[in-house]
Image (cartoon, rainbow, N blue to C red):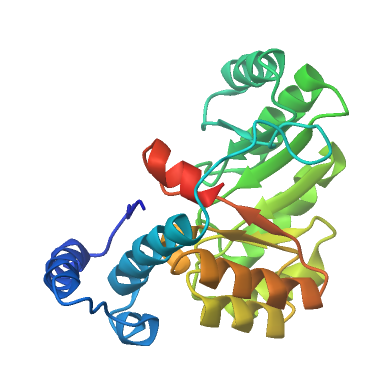
Amino acid sequence: AALALAGVAQGDDTILAALIREASDGLLTGQLPSAADLELHGPPGRALNAAIDSARLDLDRPATLPETAPDGDGVGVNATIPSLEAAAAAEAARHSVELGFTTLKVKAGAERETAPLVERIRVIREAIGPDVRLRLDVNGAWDLATAEDRISAVAPFDIEYVEQPLASHDVDGLAELRRRVRVPIAADEAAASVQAARALLAADAVDALVVKPARVGGPAAVAEIAELAAERGVPVVISTQFETGVGIAAAL
């Protein structure tokens, strides 16, 4: 099993270390904390539960990862294009496509004005052609008015979805934004747990959920979120928090 936390809140790493020590001591007597108990500790508890659940999954079903999906295609992975100036971003996008990526995620949110973002997306789309899927990832940097303006401005470039355009706590804002724009809206940081995902779905706030197994609590939590999302026709994208290859294998 693997465990990783990116961008932990102050003190979360200390709590996580303490929980790991307690769980390790419990292994000597065959006792491990329950998912409900770990949920009381928030993100550190869910992270440890992800590790425990992944280990249980390995015991129940030896980890053998297929090289290809059942339909013969490889497992799809997006390339990430950082916040570069337009020409450099276009070159990075073109290079990613040459390497075989068919989906690109462009980091946005650092721009002070709308025009530079539009120009960057324009030249990227021009460089990669119409068939490569293009996503934007804002990491919660915009307010509602800015998000509406910028998403509407890049809509002509066939954006698959815009990921976390508003702050993670602003579920009502995401729902309102989704009503105002025609580009699909995805939640990442806002989908931090099963309960958070349920709230997003209940508010009709998202067109897609980006789910990180180590953040939401592991395989069982991912499955529960996926079932909730499927009931509403909302797709789930699996992501990671910069884990090692072990963590990526667990997510896969």
The vertical placement of 202 against 191, above or below, is below
Residue 65, quarter of the rendered image: top right
Query: Residue 184, percent across and down?
Result: 78, 58
The vertical placement of 150 against 80, above or below, is below
Q: Is residue 104 visible?
A: yes
Query: How many numbered discs?
Result: 0
Query: Residue 186, percent across and down?
Result: 67, 60
- Residue at image position (61%, 83%) is 199
The vertical placement of 96 against 233, above or below, is above
Q: Is residue 242 visible?
A: no
Is residue 136 shown left or right of residue 231? left
Query: Residue 77, percent across and down?
Result: 64, 36
- Residue at image position (50%, 57%) is 212
Is residue 192 shown left or right of residue 234? left
Nearest to the observer: residue 136 or residue 64: 64
Residue 9, quarter of the rendered image: bottom left
Query: Residue 72, percent across and down?
Result: 81, 32
